[in-house]
Image: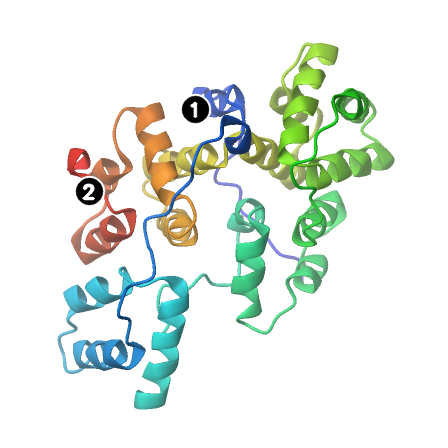
């Protein structure tokens, strides 16, 4: 059965929020430190945490505050240890803020962070590459598989090769044959972020057009969305996720699944940096928008993961 991927967030550079990302260089070139909001808890005791969670879940009234206080203050590895201890104690498994296998269009975005996704998916004893190959098709599938293989170069730059690669990308946008799509995919998935930044600059010089604009004009569907996502993440991944969060909160009636996935998946990687980008670009903090658009203990849990600063209140 082929995976059906909804398309709630079309990425068009005509959207000013997307254009803001297009004009910025990538994190590594800007030498910006990225930082998460959740860290390993000191003096961690998974058995004690499992006992406290068990007590919180007993009876008719769940102690939600206790659940939030524990689960949002433990890193993913610690939550997995708590889940194992919980299962040993109570004979049932606790699903504690883990990233689930991807069944929707979040796969398109989150797969870019290769190491985290491979680790998370392995918890379910599934082969991510095989599942992608069986559930998707065409150049969209081939690009996802290429990303999963993790063959991207690290830190390598070659200005002369950048000019050649830019010409290949320009031809791929003009010809749009299967061979040209494959060459486009190979460059975007395998060149280092630093090298791709040079390639995008050369592309602009050759074509007089931004890479995102060219992709949007020449391709469509999930393949186009994935290519644009790669380009935007190369330029500034935290800014890209800030854009996704803003769209999920403001444009689509607080799209819960997208907000939850991004906050949890990026909480130990660069969520603090995402928060900074969010406030820089949209004027109000992520903490502020979650507080105003979510409610109840759900809001409290999201804000705990977000970890707002004093000025965000």
Residue 127 picture location, percent across and down: 65, 67
Query: Can the viewer see residue 252?
Result: no
Q: Image quarter for residue 219? A: top right
Residue that carries the numbered disc 1 in the rendered image: 17
Question: Residue at the location (79% across, 25% down)?
Answer: 161
Q: Nearer the viewer, residue 193 or 312?
A: 193
Quadrant location, the C terminus: top left
Residue 102 picture location, percent across and down: 53, 58
Q: Image quarter for residue 86? A: bottom left
User: SS for tag 1?
Assistant: helix
Q: Which mark is residue 285?
A: none
Query: Can the viewer see residue 143?
Result: yes
User: SS for tag 2?
Assistant: helix
Residue that carries the numbered disc 2 in the rendered image: 291
Badge 1 or badge 2: first in the primary sequence: 1
Quadrant location, the N terminus: bottom right
168 left or right, relative to 133: right
């Amino acid at each position: 059965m082929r995976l059906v991927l909804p398309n709630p967030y079309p990425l068009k550079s005509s959207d000013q929020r997307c254009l803001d990302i297009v004009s910025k260089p990538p994190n590594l070139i800007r030498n910006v430190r990225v930082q998460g909001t959740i860290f390993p808890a000191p003096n961690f005791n998974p058995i004690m945490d499992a006992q406290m969670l068990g007590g919180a879940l007993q009876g008719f009234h769940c102690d939600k505050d206790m659940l939030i206080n524990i689960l949002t203050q433990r890193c993913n590895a610690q939550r997995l240890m708590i889940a194992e201890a919980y299962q040993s104690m109570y004979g049932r498994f606790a699903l504690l803020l883990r990233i689930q296998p991807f069944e929707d269009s979040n796969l398109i975005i989150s797969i870019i962070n290769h190491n985290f996704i491979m680790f998370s998916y392995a918890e379910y004893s599934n082969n991510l590459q095989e599942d992608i190959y069986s559930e998707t098709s065409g150049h969209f599938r081939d690009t996802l598989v290429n990303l999963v293989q993790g063959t991207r170069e690290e830190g390598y730059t070659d200005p002369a090769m950048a000019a050649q690669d830019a010409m290949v990308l320009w031809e791929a946008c003009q010809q749009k044959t299967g061979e040209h799509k494959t060459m486009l995919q190979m460059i975007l998935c395998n060149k280092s972020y630093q090298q791709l930044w040079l390639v995008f600059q050369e592309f602009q010089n050759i074509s007089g057009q931004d890479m995102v604009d060219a992709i949007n004009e020449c391709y469509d569907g999930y393949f186009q969305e994935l290519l644009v996502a790669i380009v935007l993440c190369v330029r500034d991944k935290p800014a890209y996720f800030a854009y996704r969060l803003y769209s999920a909160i403001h444009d689509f009636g607080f799209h819960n699944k997208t907000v939850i996935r991004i906050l949890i998946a990026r909480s130990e990687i660069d969520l603090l940096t995402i928060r900074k980008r969010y406030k820089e670009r949209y004027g109000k903090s992520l903490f502020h928008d979650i507080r105003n658009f979510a409610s109840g203990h759900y809001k409290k849990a999201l804000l705990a993961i977000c970890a707002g600063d004093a000025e965000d209140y």
